[in-house]
Image (spheres, grey):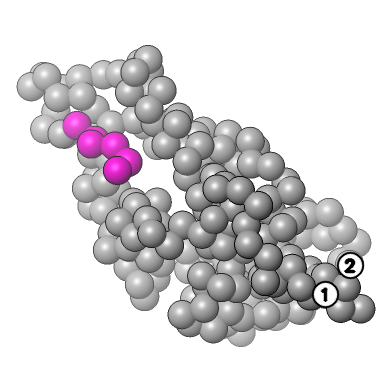
């Protein structure tokens, strides 16, 4: 992701949300990634009648709905797809007998399907827990102190080495991107006869 990617996301995804085409007044909450704060992105969002709120560094585990409630059930589902693929999926092998990693298309399908299976109630509760969508009259302020209702709504902070986390060593902190070499290290190079087996999610 970079400045161009942010503007592309705004034009292809953000403006197509419910109310986006009418340019309804909206709030977009995101982190301190540099591309979120460049002038071109701010200008594009202003044109879409969107205010932004920046989550300060170090507070994503408290104020980022994804970290607070959503990542855990989402990644559990992706891992389930991986396990099923390992057991029953169609696989190809190199001349040396090594199993090739799942294709990028397959992994993207897992991500899309996992998102579709996520309970919308978890998402709504995550925004309440982070104090983003609470009623302005104060009647929902106590939700900030509620414990998660289920294991699915717990934070994923203990999963520090998960390859799906965007802040692990495989990502470039400056650009928040995963390059080809990092992808190959995570999943293997499916086009290479020398590729090694992807060990799976720990």
Please determine whether, in this image, residue 3 is positioned above or below residue 179.
Answer: below
Q: Secondary structure at mark 1?
A: loop
Q: Is residue 120 left or right of residue 32?
A: right
Q: Position of residue 182 (x, y in %)?
A: 26, 53
Total labels drawn: 2
State the residue position of label 2.
24
Q: Residue at x 74, y 56 (%)?
A: 124
Q: Residue at x 74, y 68 (%)?
A: 143
Query: Tags 1 and 2 in contact by the CB under 8 Å rule?
Result: yes
Quarter of the rendering containing residue 38: bottom right
Membership of 48 in magenta stretch: no
Q: Position of residue 176 (x, y in %)?
A: 41, 67
Question: Is there any visible trace of residue 191 in the rendered image?
Answer: no
Quarter of the rendering containing residue 86: top left
Q: Is residue 128 left or right of residue 161?
A: right
Q: Residues within 10 Å of mark 2 (few under 14, many from 20)?
A: few
Q: Position of residue 23 (x, y in %)?
A: 87, 66
Question: Is there any visible trace of residue 147 in the rendered image?
Answer: yes
Point out the tag, 1 or 2, that comes first from the N-terminus.
2
Q: Position of residue 123 (x, y in %)?
A: 69, 53
Please determine whether, in this image, residue 89 is positioned above or below residue 31.
Answer: above
Membership of 200 in magenta stretch: yes
Range drawn in magenta: 197-202
Q: Residue at x 83, y 70 (%)?
A: 140
Please determine whether, in this image, residue 41 is positioned above or below residue 184.
Answer: below
């Amino acid at each position: 992701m970079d400045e161009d990617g942010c503007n592309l996301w705004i034009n292809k995804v953000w403006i197509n949300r419910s109310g986006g085409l009418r340019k309804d007044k909206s709030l977009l909450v995101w982190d301190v990634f540099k591309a979120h704060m460049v002038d071109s992105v701010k200008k594009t969002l202003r044109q879409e009648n969107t205010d932004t709120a920046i989550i300060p560094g170090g507070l994503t585990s408290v104020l980022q709905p994804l970290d607070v409630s959503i990542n855990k059930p989402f990644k559990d589902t992706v891992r389930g797809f991986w396990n099923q693929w390992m057991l029953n999926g169609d696989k190809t092998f190199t001349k040396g007998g090594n199993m090739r990693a799942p294709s990028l298309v397959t992994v993207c399908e897992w991500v899309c399907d996992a998102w579709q299976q996520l309970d919308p109630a978890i998402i709504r509760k995550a925004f309440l827990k982070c104090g983003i969508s609470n009623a302005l009259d104060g009647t929902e302020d106590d939700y900030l102190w509620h414990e998660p209702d289920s294991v699915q709504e717990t934070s994923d902070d203990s999963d520090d080495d998960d390859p799906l986390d965007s802040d692990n060593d495989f990502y470039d902190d400056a650009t928040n991107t995963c390059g080809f070499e990092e992808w190959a290290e995570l999943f293997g190079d499916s086009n290479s006869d020398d590729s090694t087996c992807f060990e799976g999610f720990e």
